[in-house]
């Protein structure tokens, strides 16, 4: 197996292992093989084989189990079951089968929970009760024992109602992980499965990742969208009497700092404003009843806010050079050294994408807790100094090389003149004050697809000037799009840009929050550690929330709040709103990153015969009967992206 990995497959949990990939034998050679790991989702493994593979017609969902190991160090990189598979043929007639496998945590989706009430119960005992119920319902090989369970709360006591409409995994996520935090892991110890639930899973690695040793490239993503430069602190509600005797107003103001801050309700940080502009937010302390205390809390919050999201992605990390006990795992903290970018920091691995066949495609994504403002500034200074130093080193080397060249060519006057001209040109480029203007962004076709488009030839789609493909993940929580895994994987492989969308079916705010978690987790199950979607879109085109249009705003707000909690900011959320329901829904359109509206008119696939939406929009879906090479049948077409929508594509 390439780079020391061994991939095996077996029919049934206790079946005989068969080699799935070999560098030697053509009949057991995979076309592609990629492991995706994330601390926020369980592992997945995607592999592709062609009809010459001896197991091409054998592999089936749920019946087959896959394991990826490194025999030289005895480490298991992935173990789980085949979840879905798809057959496809591209425009050149090449036929392939792609299988998507899920990690052992997927077993928890195979059982449901009865309605129960728990109180005076520790988080560990509550989790044990859920696992006991799971073990009653499933085969012996899917049964779990509790391993390391160290997540708790200040009272080591939970009060919970188990949701009998959800499976065991979703109950654990909803009743424990989403409320107490922490991370889950199922591990196989000699055929016995253990479930760990810990605040953070992973160790501090001894191995370093260094530029020019086991690292070829790196990129930094800085997201300051949560920075607050002007704060309005709010304290406890100040009850007031209504005009009618004995009645209290339904809405009452909160305590502000005005009386302790010279009549001003706001706190300003001029240094932050100079750097990020005016960004006004509120922060509420329900237990604060005096203005002086509220003022102090507001100042501390503004000065110590950790609002800079920092992510470091490493490319071409060759894990084959990392040996023995130093082998990296998702969740580990590791030191990264890249002198050219001024990086020598210890970060936590939050995602890994391991290409078993082509090491150059392997990436590791690292991040720790959000940065405080001062830490962000220090890192920015280090990075700037390192990049300037690297630039001047490059110029010095160019000048030294040029000097040597002049000495060798001084016998030829013409060559000296040519060299002088070249030096002058180089000097002009170095000293140029005006950077080269970027070329205008080309916007091609924008489509949205779902399982209704069947098998898509993504190479053909991308070649037909499709700039963005918006891929459905689910219709509510209950229906997972049958093609979303395949569509996302193959769109990425074909080099396309993509976004994801989910149809809103929330019957309550709690239901909307669960849909948001399912939307995010299902997406990350496929793309954790890989190319992330450019945005998450909510498809809102029917009256839900118990049939009350007046409640749709609250449901969508709850959905967006949950996506925020999962790390998706408002500017990465798009609202697709039915044109005829826009007014009655009264959604908070100012909050979203963009508004996408359908309006078809004659609906013949042309813009000329389509009717523009009657409400403001950032993207217009003008037809559901478009035609795109690589897609059989009709496809939705979109046009007229606004400037803020175009930012998604930059």
Image: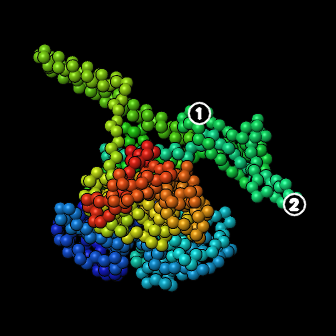
Q: Which mark is residue 271?
A: 1
The residue to which callout 2 is attached is 246
Quadrant of the image occupied by residue 160: bottom right
Label 2 vs label 1: CA separation?
49 Å
The image shows a total of numbered marks equal to 2
Q: Is residue 302 visible?
A: no
Foreground pick, 295 / 389: 295
Query: Which residue is at a point 77% across and 44% down the rendered structure image?
Result: 291
- Percent of width and height locating residue 613: 46, 53
Foreground pick, 185 / 458: 458
Q: Is residue 173 left or right of residue 291?
A: left
Query: Which residue is at a point 34% across and 24% down the rendered structure image?
Result: 432
Foreground pick, 344 / 90: 90
Query: Which residue is at a point 17% across and 16% down the rendered structure image?
Result: 417
Label 1, residues with CA under 10 Å away: few <14, some 14-19, many ≥20? few
Are the residues flagged by discs 2 and 1 in contact, CB closer than 8 Å? Answer: no
**Mark 1 element type:** helix
Q: Is residue 461 left or right of residue 567?
A: left
- Percent of width and height locating residue 550: 61, 62
- Percent of width and height locating residue 186: 45, 70
């Amino acid at each position: 197996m390439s780079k020391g990995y061994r991939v095996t497959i077996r029919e049934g949990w206790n079946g005989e292992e068969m080699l799935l990939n070999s560098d030697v034998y053509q009949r057991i050679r995979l076309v592609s093989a990629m492991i995706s790991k994330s601390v926020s989702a369980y592992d997945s493994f995607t592999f592709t084989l062609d009809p010459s593979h001896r197991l091409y017609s054998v592999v089936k969902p749920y019946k087959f189990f896959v394991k990826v190991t490194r025999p030289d160090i005895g480490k298991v990189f992935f173990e789980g079951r085949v979840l879905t598979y798809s057959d496809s043929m591209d425009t050149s007639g090449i036929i392939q089968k792609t299988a998507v496998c899920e990690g052992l945590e997927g077993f928890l989706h195979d059982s449901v929970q009865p309605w129960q009430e728990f109180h005076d119960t520790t988080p560990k005992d509550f989790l044990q009760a859920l696992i006991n119920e799971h073990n009653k319902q499933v085969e012996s090989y899917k049964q779990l024992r509790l391993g390391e369970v160290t997540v708790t709360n200040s009272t080591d006591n939970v009060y919970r109602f188990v949701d009998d409409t959800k499976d065991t995994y979703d109950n654990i996520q909803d009743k424990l992980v989403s409320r107490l935090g922490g991370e889950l892991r199922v591990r196989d110890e000699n055929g016995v499965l253990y479930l760990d639930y810990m605040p953070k899973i992973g160790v501090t690695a001894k191995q370093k990742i260094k530029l020019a040793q086991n690292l070829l490239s790196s990129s930094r993503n800085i997201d300051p969208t949560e920075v607050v430069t002007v704060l309005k602190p709010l304290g406890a509600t100040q009850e007031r009497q209504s005009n009618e005797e004995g009645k209290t107003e339904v809405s009452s103001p909160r305590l502000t700092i005005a009386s302790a801050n010279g009549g001003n309700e706001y706190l300003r940080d001029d240094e932050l404003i100079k750097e990020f502009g005016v960004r006004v937010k509120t922060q509420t302390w329900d237990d604060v009843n005096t203005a002086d205390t509220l003022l102090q809390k507001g100042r501390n919050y503004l000065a110590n806010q950790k609002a800079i999201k920092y992510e470091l992605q490493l490319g071409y990390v060759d894990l084959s050079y990392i040996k023995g006990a130093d082998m990296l795992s998702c969740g580990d903290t590791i030191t990264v050294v890249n002198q050219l970018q001024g990086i020598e920091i210890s970060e936590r691995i939050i995602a890994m994408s391991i290409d078993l066949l082509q090491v150059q495609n392997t990436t590791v994504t690292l991040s720790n807790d959000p940065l405080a403002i001062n830490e962000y500034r220090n890192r920015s200074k280090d990075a700037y100094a390192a990049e300037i130093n690297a630039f001047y080193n490059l110029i010095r080397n160019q000048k030294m090389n040029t000097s040597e060249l002049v000495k060798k060519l001084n016998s030829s006057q013409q060559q000296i003149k040519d060299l002088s001209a070249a030096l002058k040109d180089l000097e002009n480029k170095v000293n140029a004050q005006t950077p080269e203007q970027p070329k205008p962004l080309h916007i091609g076709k924008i489509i949205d697809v779902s399982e209704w488009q069947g098998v898509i030839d993504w190479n053909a789609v991308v070649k037909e000037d499709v700039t963005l493909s918006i891929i459905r993940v689910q219709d509510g929580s209950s229906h997972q799009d049958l093609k979303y895994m395949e569509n996302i994987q193959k769109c990425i492989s074909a080099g396309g840009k993509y976004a994801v969308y989910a149809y809103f079916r929330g019957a309550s705010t709690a239901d909307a929050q669960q849909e948001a978690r399912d939307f995010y987790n299902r997406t990350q199950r496929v793309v954790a550690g890989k190319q992330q979607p450019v945005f998450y879109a909510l498809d809102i085109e029917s009256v839900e929330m118990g049939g009350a249009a007046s409640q749709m705003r609250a449901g969508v707000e709850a959905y967006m709040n949950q996506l925020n909690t999962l790390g998706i900011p408002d500017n990465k959320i798009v609202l697709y709103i039915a044109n005829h329901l826009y007014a009655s829904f009264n959604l908070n359109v100012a909050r979203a990153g963009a508004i996408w509206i359908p309006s078809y008119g004659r609906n013949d696939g042309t813009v000329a015969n389509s009717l523009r939406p009657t409400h403001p929009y950032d993207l217009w879906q003008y037809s559901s009967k478009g035609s795109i090479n690589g897609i059989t049948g009709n496809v939705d077409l979109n046009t007229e992206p606004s400037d803020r929508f175009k930012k998604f594509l930059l």
